[in-house]
């Protein structure tokens, strides 16, 4: 079993706030991440898949096909977007890094399987000081 | 003359769009940066000052004092904010990286002089693939 | 289960040497790391905790609370200190990266549990070419 | 059990192409990686070994000895070489990152054991956007 | 005057050797860079242009147009190529980083002017430990 | 004129404190950098030299010769040392990043000239958030 990882990047706005709470309550719970007018990040996404290298190519998966899958199912939906407003698969969810990583896993698990590999992990870095990893359960 | 640089970071939302233009016209000129619901970045700021090291300390400037000046005059005004909406010194300006760098220079030139050093440059990195430098003229 | 990581940094002096050995013997075993007058590093620490995201916030753990715990129990005790001399929890231990990582785990495991999460790993990078990971057993 | 990692680097040429195929067929399957006149990379290699720290030194393994092993068994055979042509242990293999990582594992597993540690993983980064990990099975 | 930089990357093979010299003489002068079967690098290119921000956009230059220019005149000619064999504008030149940077400048100076900006510098990084800068004279 | 840069690294201990001052006075002026038992850093050094590429090689300077000069005149004197105690050319000087950069320039200017190039700048990075540049006057 070999693990291969593709890195992609996107830039997006978001905020952490509950609409049913006051700004004061949101500030108390979510701190500066609750700014009503949004803030944003350069997110870095690492998608790791696993499998056996195919003998004739030496590939677990064709990395450009994997990149295309990530772009189709994630990047074009989130890059230069607002995670809370513009992204169909985040509707109704807090846009914490944890929740985004889980949502990305759900977006990718099936199309990665269709490439003949198995999704192993999604790692999402929000800033240089924090990142989240999700392994599907 | 020795040049010393302090790096600071902030995360902010913005968009590139003119309110008097339609969404279509903004999209044509500014591309995906014009998304009406905003996007955002982890900006990296490098502030370089110059001067002669003071003999008793070996310092051109006390770096923690320089960091405090950058935080007071810039970071606390832009971090986890919307560059177009929340920042007094960006009012009426397009929030291109070029314009933000110039505005940061104008914010810093006087308080840096009060520290006994001279502002040399402001470098502002918007993504890992682009950055702007401004030297005051 | 989601894994979330907080990165912190500190700068410290140390040496690898046994006081009961001669400088020559220490040099033979520990090489340049045994310099009697110390050397030092910019250490980079990654603390990973795991748990289920809390539905109302989307957080496994409040990252600023995690950062505070790391600062209280580790960073303020080691930053700009001498790992061999100044750090109570390293007393009597060789200050190898391995031993420091284990000691950091022991410092963190209980306060992380009090945040409602579970400590998963401590990763400590000593230089750009080496790092250690410890998972508690 | 503690995990310790040594990073090494090398620069090499390679191509992905099957000699029994036409250039057109190779281009179709391997894309620009099939360029007949080669291309190349700055590869970054992370070798992770595991073990218990030896009480008198605090070391799982002497990192300079581990570095020497990696240099003897890998770096001096691949650095500033052509992975397809110059490297004995890659003969007859496609030089995909997957296959190189597996071959490196096979080169290292015995000499690492002779250092008194156990090889845990080989991570090989080909570009800033992709890397492979292999754990020996 | 504001300076704005676009980063692009490419992977290429090359060698440093004079065809009229023996392998031994090439090895003596160029060391391991003279390997007859080539080696390669992940090159990182920074192109800096300067100008005044255009008031209505805040742009010195449209960065996506600058990226297109760099891709058309450089990246598509060198990426996944052999610098000595495949690149028309390097014919007859030693492929030292110095010479490549000068050749890139010559490729870019006119199309950058056609964008309405002025080429300021070309920075070319060959490995994490060395890079070259050229300012046109 | 082409500028070429070599990066080298070293790890050293130091402190900022005047022996004729009390610990309290040193703490007041130099903050945590005055810790009597030292602290330390992974310093990153960039040495830039300039000249015309020699036509037969394409080199401004042989980078391995430049690396040897930096190692002989700087790295072997400071790596895994105490900057205040062990380094002859820092005797009597505050070990601020500014003063170290100036001292490195003085160490390098003559041996770089003997390589047939001209020293352009010394850049010394103390942490990821600060660095100093010196151009010789």
Image (cartoon, coloured by chain):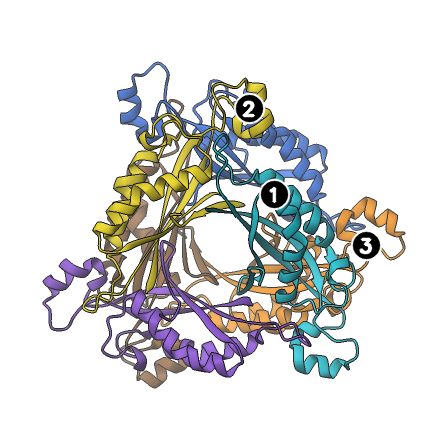
Chain colours: A blue, B yellow, C brown, D orange, E cyan, F purple
Q: Nearer the viewer, mark 3 or mark 2?
A: 2
Determine whether E122 is above or below F74 in the image: above
Q: Secondary structure at mark 2?
A: helix
Front in this rendered view, residue B121 or E44: B121
Residue at image x 30%, y 84%? C22
Q: Chain of mark 1?
A: E
Q: Is residue C40 left or right of residue D3?
A: left
Mark yes or no: residue A130 visible: no
Q: Are marks 1 and 3 in contact (CB under 8 Å)?
A: no
Task: Determine the CA span between mark 1 and mark 2.
Answer: 19 Å
Relative image position of residue E17 (x, y in whole percent)? 72, 74
Judging by the rendered image, the residue that carries numbered circle 1 is E66
Q: Quadrant of residue F24?
A: bottom left
Front in this rendered view, residue D110 or B5: B5
Determine whether F105 is above or below B112 in the image: below
Q: Is residue F111 left or right of residue E45?
A: left
Front in this rendered view, residue A30 or B28: B28
In this rendering, do the residues under marks 1 and 3 share a single chain?
Answer: no
* Crowding at mark 2 (Cα within 10 Å: few <14, some 14-19, many 20+): many
Q: Secondary structure at mark 1?
A: helix
Judging by the rendered image, the residue that carries numbered circle 3 is D17
Task: Determine the CA span between mark 1 and mark 3.
Answer: 33 Å
Q: Nearer the viewer, mark 1 or mark 3?
A: 1
Judging by the rendered image, the residue that carries numbered circle 2 is B26
């Amino acid at each position: 079993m070999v693990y291969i990882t593709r890195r992609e990047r996107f830039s997006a706005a978001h905020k952490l706030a509950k609409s049913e709470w006051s700004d004061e309550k949101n500030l108390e719970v979510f701190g500066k991440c609750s700014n009503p007018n949004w803030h944003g990040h350069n997110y870095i996404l690492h998608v790791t898949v696993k499998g056996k290298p195919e003998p004739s190519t030496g590939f677990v998966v064709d990395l450009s096909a994997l990149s295309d899958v990530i772009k189709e199912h994630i990047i074009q939906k989130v890059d230069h977007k607002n995670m809370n407003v513009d992204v169909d698969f985040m509707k109704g969810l807090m846009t914490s890094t944890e929740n985004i990583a889980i949502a990305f896993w759900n977006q990718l698990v099936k199309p990665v399987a269709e490439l003949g590999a198995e999704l192993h992990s999604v790692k999402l870095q929000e800033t240089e000081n924090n990142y989240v990893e999700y392994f599907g359960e």
